[in-house]
Image (cartoon, coloured by chain):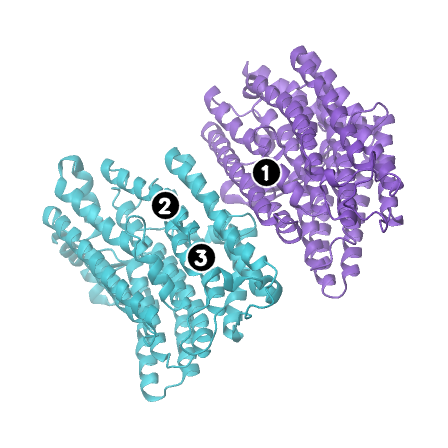
Amino acid sequence: MILVWLLIVLIVGGLAALAAGSWSANASRWVSILTFLIGLAIGLYLWVTHADAVTVAQTGGWIVRFKVPWIPRFGIDFQLGLDGLSLMLIMLSLFLGLVSVITSWSEIREQVGFFHFNLVWTLAGTLGVFMALDLFLFFAFWEAMLVPMYFLIALWGHENRRYAANKFFLFTFGSGLLMLVAIIALATIHFADTGTLTFDYFALLGTKMSATAAAFTMLGFFLAFAVKLPAVPFHTWLPDAHTEAPTAGSVILAGVLLKTGAYGLYRFAVPLFPEAAMNFAPIAMTLAVISILYGGIVAFGQSDLKRLVAYTSVSHLGFVLLAVYASNVLALQGGVLVMMAHGITTGALFMLVGALQERTHTREMSRMGGLWPHLPRMAGIGMFFAIAALGLPGLSNFVGELMSLLGTFRASMGFASAAALGLIVAVIYSLYWMQRVFQGPTGTQIEVAGLSDFGARELGTMAAMVIITIWIGVYPQPIIDILDPALTGMRETITVTMMSEG
Amino acid sequence: MATDQSLVIALLPEIVSGTFLTKQLLALLPEIILGAFVLIVMLAVAFYRHHGVTFALTLLGLALALLSLPFAMAVSPQRVTPLFVIDGYALFYAGLVLAAAFATALLMFAYFRARSGRAEELYILLLLASLGAMNLAASSNLASLFLSLELLSVALFAMIAYRATQLRPLEAGIKYLFMAGVSSAFLLFGIALLYARIGTLTFGILASRLSALDLGTEPTVLAGLVMIVVGLGFKISVIPFHMWTPDVYQGAPAPVSGFLASVSKSAAIAVLLRTFIAAGSIHVGPLFLVLNLIAIASMVAGNLLALLQDDVKRILAYSSIAHLGYIFVAFLIGGHFAVEAVTFYMATYVIMILGAFGVVSVVSRPADGAEEQTRLNDYAGLFWRRPWLATAFTLALLSLAGIPLTIGFIGKFYLFTAGVRDALWPALTALILGSVIGLFYYLRVIAAMARRPDEEAEPITTHAGLAGACALFIITIVLVGLGVYPAVLIDLIRISAGHIVGLS
């Protein structure tokens, strides 16, 4: 029931933010902050009370589950469940939600209530995605979260916002329909086999089906998740959406929405069709390596700073895709750590870009340059997150990328070696943009005199993100502890299914 | 007709004792009430012409007819003369038609009160058309099918052209008249061909005799069936019988367009479903192919054509073509699940299209002689000016697009399930493609509403009034409520429409 309360808190919080918005803009902001804080408190409570990995392992990694019938005609339940993987992603989402509210404090001035309503409801939708254990419910959340996100981009975005918002919605919606067909096909096959129509995740695990049926069904899921992740060649919506979205929208998109794609691969695409997924692994891992390298190289070629950061997401999420299909616990843990690290560092970078744009009114790097003496705090923080993103040991990204590469190395030396080249590309583009924006001669086209550096509100947020980055980089063990039973359980399900079929 | 006579003979004792008649009358109660109110409203208009009174009487008639449905349900299934059969299926569609007519009456009141001119006769026509639609769903004979369809169509000509001082409605009325004439001709010819070869007009007997024939070697029968599809195809405006739709929808007063899209289509679909599924002839090779092609063409072309429109009513018209194509996907599978899926989607569609046209009828300049404001640009900034109205429209459009938490999604889910069950991959591909294109133009409308209001532009005027606001509020609540908890409607359909005479 606590999971339902978590959703209710966000749903009611969104409505309250909308209502408060008609009264005063700040009231709406504070209501959203309060909502996320309550959510985080619930998450922390669950984490602390279930930090003991041993008891959790006995339940197959599940911390809490909740199930009531919803549409009995089709055997659809309202079923939620939380394991370490879901919990970590939920904590990340709520934290980034909090950050988004703070970062849009001065950026969003129109229709503040409706903005926060959309922000909170987008996160309510993603939380639903991370918790749903009924495939129908999962799909409902998957599509429902698009609508508020669409409005965030279409109403408060930059110049090309409507084009970007449409592209984002259409890509995700179209690939989502393929997944819907796959979900129904899976349930129908299960029905033909057992005589029970159900969309229950646990019932559908290990459904017996022909190799062809499994391959096509798996592909339906994979496409939806690969678009969301995004993996090359399905990534073209991402640079537009990220660039045109308001800062808070970019933070949520990169930090949270992309993770739903990764989560789908972890939870559904591989465990539901283990054999088909293993056969597909070489293709998926090839796509992953291409994403890592291509994303990095294209990022290097951008002149728009926000677009550059957007493309780095393609590169970073490539490591997650690689880890999923390497399919051993080490790689899977590494993948989750990459997600957490990417969420924090990319979120921070988007905030930095947003702050730069607010001050200099441009995102073009060619018009910036030499800003360090004028904006020393921003420059320092920017440097910190740039080197975190390029994978400096001791900071968060390094741990995740190293673990996923190590795990991949066990599965395939070739892919691991190729993917490791991505680390070099990351160094190049990270240092390159630092140099162009903050170092060198001061850009002539910008009025540097009146530039104001980060204030207390922004510094405080950044400090929290810096601390988390260092914490994950130095001592990731608490996260690994809570993840371990969930991911081990997942591996065991896969092995059991494959044994019984093979 | 021999079997019909033997049926009468078999029932003779009951007829003599009178219980049969009581049951039949009870089964017909909704139709009788509606028929009576046609007369009452007509007399009321003749003696005391008052918009409010006429409106109230109409609502009363529709409400009483709705309330009488459970009584009719209690005695169903009941054969009433050889022409009609009152079963759960007919009663569900009757309820759908009555509820839609109720909403239309509310919207019409708001629409015509804001305009000068007399509107009282419109309510008589509304009741007549609803009566025709209800009878259509209950028809069990090709003759009653034809008569009911004409009752519906003739009332609709006048409703469409009701603002006869204006050019657009008049043009639309004439177009609809011609179209209805052509479709009736096809229908009659088809019926005649069937009768010539098979010798009966009753559905049940038709089905048993059809199943004994090998249609591959029976060109007359096949031609007859296809002509019936063509005739009804004009009514539900699937491609290639769609040409009239956008013009008529655009020209008719907005509440009437909504009525046309919801009631007229659902009644035609109801009878089409009964004819073909109860007749068991859906899987006949060539016919199946024809229906399949109609479905795919409607889904793809309907959506593509909607993309090119700049008028909200035309967008909704083309999208209605696509939606009927979607329904055909479920139609194609045949059997009980087809009845359930088609009925569910039809109910879904009625709710969402009434919501959409409801908003359109409220967003219009009430000035005399002016055109309705239906261009996309007229909707610019609606979100900032009329947030609630824009929210209602957005929800209706998202539902049409099939986004979760609206009823449209559950409808889509039914269609996808139907398609996957019978492995109709080409139709499913068209369904996915159509849905994506569809989303794009629904988003265009939503994006237009979200655009920052242009300061120079003349602000749009809205005049919902209490009646219009009530209608939109109820429709929106139902749209979201059933989207979140659809089990209510699913159960209702299974206990009512699931009982269709002639399908075991």
**Label 3 sits on what residue type?**
Asp
Q: Quadrant of residue B423?
A: top left
State the separation of the CA atoms marked 1 and 2: 26 Å
Give the vertical position of A57 relative to B481 (above or below): above
Looking at the image, residue B273 sits to the left or right of residue B462; the answer is left
Q: Chain of mark 3?
A: B
Give the vertical position of B482 relative to B282 (above or below): below
Q: Chain of mark 1?
A: A
Residue plotted at (70% across, 42% down): A250
Q: In this rendered view, identify the residue nearer to me: B344 or A246.
A: A246
Q: Give the drawing colour for chain B.
A: cyan
Residue plotted at (81% across, 26% down): A481
Chain in purple, by letter, is: A
Q: Which residue is mark 3?
A: B310
Q: How packed is label 1: few (under 14 Cα within 10 Å), some, or many (20 or more)?
A: many
**Label 2 sits on what residue type?**
Ala
Give the vertical position of A50 relative to A12 (above or below): above
Q: Which residue is mark 2?
A: B301
